[in-house]
Amino acid sequence: MTNTAPVDNRRADLVRVAARLFRERGFDGTTTRDIADAVGMRSGSPFYHFKSKQEILAAVMEEGLVAGLPAAEDIAAGKLPPRAKFHALVRAHLEIVLGEGHDFIPVLLYDWRRLTPELRERVQVLRDRYDQLWQDVVSELSAAGLLRSDSAVARLLLMGAINYSVLWYKPGQGSDLDQIAEEAVAMFLGPEA
């Protein structure tokens, strides 16, 4: 039996560092050599783990979605009242988008079009799972009379507003993630009755 842990760790390092560099510099502004240098590899070594820079990009996006899915699934399946469930989902999403070291989803948001159609289709499977969890909670809010619509457009508007925080949020300056979650829920649903 062979030990693949070091290989898996190197791949994970590549994905983590690539996420940070893609977020800071953009996909086009980051070379495979930049990623390799940041991990302490030779410039061709990432191709041992990935066929192309676009495959690295897809792995970054998948990592973000895979990291966010368990918490979102637990929240959506939980027995909380709809408003509390929405609050928990917003807070969990803010953590996965804005938390320290969480560069994966911002990359997905801004470099999605850089993927080949084949890679986009692969990542879309995870996006659809995540979006469905949000849609389920939006439908619960609507059924409880807390939101006027349970359409996909309502979900996209909610998530879009929250996702835009990647452009303005600065850790340690102004509101923290708990405060942002509170304000977002109040803005979308109004004050708690």
Image (cartoon, rainbow, N blue to C red):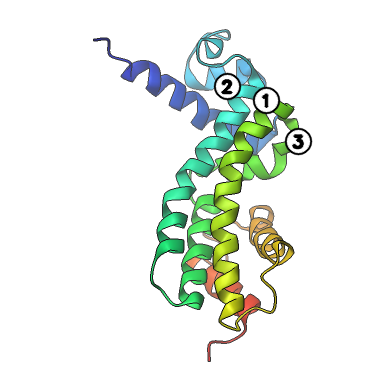
Quadrant in the picture for residue 164: bottom right
The picture places residue 98, in percent across and down from the top left corner, at 55, 53
Question: Quick one: label 1, few (<14), some, or many (20+) residues within 10 Å?
Answer: some
Q: Which of the marked residues, 3 or 2, is nearer the chain's N terminus?
A: 2
Say which of 172 and 188 sits in front.
188
Residue hosting label 3: 113
The picture places residue 54, in percent across and down from the top left corner, at 66, 23
73 lies left or right of 58: left
Q: Give residue 13's mark.
A: none
**Amino acid type of disc 1?**
Thr
150 lies left or right of 134: right
Q: Residue furthest bottom?
A: 193
Residue hosting label 2: 35
The picture places residue 111, in percent across and down from the top left corner, at 71, 37
Secondary structure beneath disc 1?
loop
Write the residue at 46% across / 44% down: 67
Rendered position, 66 above or below 184: above
Secondary structure beneath disc 2?
helix
Residue 29 in sight here? no
What whole-number distance in Å separates the C-alpha atoms at marks 3 and 2? Answer: 20 Å
Q: Residue furthest front?
A: 143
Write the residue at 41% across / 73% down: 80
Q: Which of the marked residues, 3 or 1, is nearer the chain's N terminus?
A: 1
Write the residue at 62% across / 45% down: 106
Rendered position, 51 above or below 133: above
User: Are the two marked residues, 2 and 1, in contact with CB atoms closer than 8 angstroms?
Assistant: yes
**Amino acid type of disc 2?**
Ile
Secondary structure beneath disc 3?
helix
Residue hosting label 1: 30
